[in-house]
């Protein structure tokens, strides 16, 4: 039975009770087991979108070679704006990527 059909039909049938778990590891093992289908335990019609406003996006460090004059210019501009130069570079890169994405 396709998942979409199961989600729609789960409200028509009684839901299974979620078992009590002795530990977080036991709960994780239960939900990761392919024999357990979460749609049998939750009513999809009552689900709400979760908002995790305090999560920070994952970041990756990179090494970037810039000419001394370019880096000095970026640092001067960052000082004028009273922001860290690396933060300013991220803002500029994000803006430029957004512009490029709109064109394609």
Image (spheres, rainbow, N blue to C red):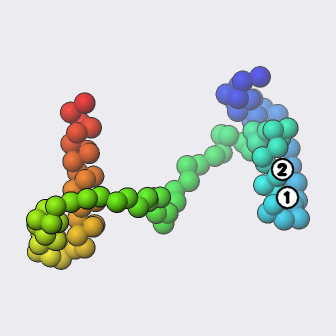
Q: Residues within 10 Å of mark 2 (few under 14, many from 20)?
A: some
Q: Is residue 103 above or below residue 66?
A: above
State which quadrant residue 9 falls in.
top right
Q: Position of residue 80 (x, y in %)?
A: 11, 74
The residue sitting at 76% across, 42% down in the picture is: 38
Mark 1–mark 2 Cα distance, whole angstroms, equals 6 Å
Of residues 70 and 40, the one nearer the viewer is 70
Numbered tag placed on residue 26 in the rendering: 1
Numbered tag placed on residue 41 in the rendering: none
Q: Position of residue 94 (x, y in %)?
A: 27, 52
Asked which secondary structure carries label 1, the reply is helix
Q: Position of residue 95 (x, y in %)?
A: 23, 51
The residue sitting at 10% across, 65% down in the picture is: 69
Whether the residues at callouts 1 and 2 have beta carbons within 8 Å, the answer is: yes
Of residues 41 and 94, the one nearer the viewer is 94
Is 6 on the left-hand or right-hand side of 80? right
Q: Position of residue 96 (x, y in %)?
A: 21, 48
Asked which secondary structure carries label 2, the reply is helix
Q: On the image, numbered disc 2 is attached to which residue?
A: 30
State which quadrant residue 36 falls in.
top right
């Amino acid at each position: 039975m396709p998942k979409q059909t199961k989600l729609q039909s789960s409200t028509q049938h009684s839901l299974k009770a979620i078992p009590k778990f002795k530990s977080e590891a036991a709960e994780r093992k239960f939900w990761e087991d392919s024999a357990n289908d979460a749609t049998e335990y939750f009513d999809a019609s009552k689900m709400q979108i979760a908002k995790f406003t305090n999560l920070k996006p994952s970041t990756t460090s990179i090494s970037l070679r810039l000419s001394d004059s370019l880096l000095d210019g970026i640092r001067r501009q960052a000082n004028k704006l009273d922001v860290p130069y690396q933060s300013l570079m991220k803002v500029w890169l994000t803006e430029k990527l957004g512009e490029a994405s709109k064109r394609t």
